[in-house]
């Protein structure tokens, strides 16, 4: 029997030990969505931005050169150490780190012109509360940008995705579909507007190595993929080496 741990502890353990890997991960360090975040930041040149669940800080790094101040906020202290070191190396003196949970933001109402989250929200145990918090700290007229991997609307493909995600990473909670995301954002008091989606290629060996997935769980993922129905394999463009494509989306919201 394992030691009793709550979800926050699991997240901190998972990402604390893999922080450096996420800084160098091409999946996280690259993408047209980072250029879009920079463009959003330029709209609030003297403003403040908040990156919720910042991970290794790539979204914060993209915004910092174009806006007054950026707060990189994450639950894992080791992640924030990596972000702070990388920001110093890049000369981003306006980027500051702060530790905490997404569902309890330690900021006053209407503190930020731009609030974003990138590839983090599928780890949050109380997504509605976290989104309400993001809406609370966003200034009227500000923008909230959500970027995350998303689930298929097809329930069979969704079941396979949630299963392999949890096997790979014990801190996984749930990927949401784009329609579910838009409803959650509206329920939080935000107005979803423009959005886009794309396929994100994941190289299997790098994907499991980045999270240090135990060998028995890697074997279980391969077993699941090996027995997947043809329509599931086709949806994810599953390859011989178990690499696959996952859906990702960006949703722009207003307050």
Image: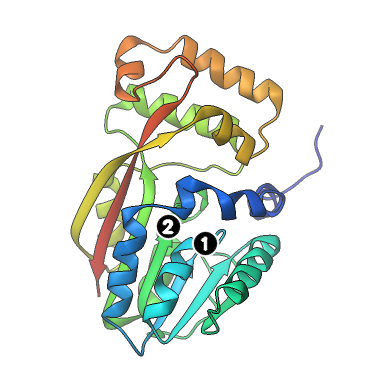
Q: Going 41% across and 18% down the picture, which residue do you hit?
A: 239
Does residue 170 appear anywhere in the picture?
Answer: no
The residue under label 2 is: 118
The C terminus appears in which quarter of the rendering?
A: bottom left
Q: Is residue 20 above or below residue 129?
A: above
Q: Is residue 202 above or below residue 74?
A: above
Q: Residues within 10 Å of mark 2 (few under 14, many from 20)?
A: many
Q: Going 36% across and 17% down the picture, which residue do you hit?
A: 233
Picture coordinates of residue 250, whole percent (x, y):
29, 54
Q: Secondary structure at mark 2?
A: strand
The N terminus appears in which quarter of the rendering?
A: top right
Left or right, 63 with reference to 179: right
Picture coordinates of residue 75, whole percent (x, y):
62, 62
Between 96 and 8, the residue placed more toward the observer is 96
Q: Going 50% across and 82% down the picture, which residue do you hit?
A: 107
Q: Going 30% across and 23% down the picture, which residue do you hit?
A: 235
- Kindly give the residue lying farthest to the left in the view shown: 193
How many circles with numbers are drawn on the protein? 2
Q: Which mark is residue 27?
A: none
Q: Secondary structure at mark 1?
A: loop
Picture coordinates of residue 232, whole percent (x, y):
34, 18
Between 254 and 225, the residue placed more toward the observer is 225
Left or right, 20 with reference to 92: right
Q: Is residue 66 above or below residue 159?
A: below
Task: Tell me the CA gap for discs 2 and 1.
Answer: 7 Å
Name which quarter of the figure residue 81 lies in. bottom right
Name which quarter of the figure residue 96 lies in. bottom right
Between 21 and 111, the residue placed more toward the observer is 21
The residue under label 1 is: 53
């Amino acid at each position: 029997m394992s030691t009793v741990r709550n979800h926050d502890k699991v997240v901190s353990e998972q990402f604390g030990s893999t922080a450096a890997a996420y800084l160098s991960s091409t999946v996280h360090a690259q993408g047209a969505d980072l250029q879009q975040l920079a463009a959003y930041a330029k709209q609030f040149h003297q403003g403040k931005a908040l990156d919720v669940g910042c991970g290794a800080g790539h979204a914060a790094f993209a915004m910092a050169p174009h806006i007054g101040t950026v707060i990189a906020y994450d639950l894992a202290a080791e992640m924030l150490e990596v972000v702070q070191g990388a920001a110093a190396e890049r000369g981003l003196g306006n980027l500051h780190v702060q530790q905490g949970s997404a569902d309890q933001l330690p900021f006053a109402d209407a503190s930020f012109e731009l609030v974003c989250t990138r590839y983090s929200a599928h780890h949050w145990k109380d997504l509605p509360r976290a989104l309400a918090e993001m809406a609370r700290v966003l200034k009227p007229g500000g923008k909230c940008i959500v970027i995350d991997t998303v689930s298929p609307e097809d329930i069979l493909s969704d079941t396979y995705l949630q299963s392999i995600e949890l096997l790979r990473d014990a801190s996984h909670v749930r990927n949401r579909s784009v329609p579910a995301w838009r409803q959650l954002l509206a329920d939080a008091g935000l107005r979803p507007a423009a959005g886009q989606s794309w396929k994100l290629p994941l190289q299997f060996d790098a994907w499991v190595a980045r999270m240090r997935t135990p060998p028995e769980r890697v074997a279980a993922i391969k077993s699941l993929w090996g027995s997947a129905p043809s329509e599931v394999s086709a949806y994810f463009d599953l390859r011989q080496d178990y690499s696959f494509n996952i859906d990702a989306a960006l949703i722009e919201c207003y307050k």
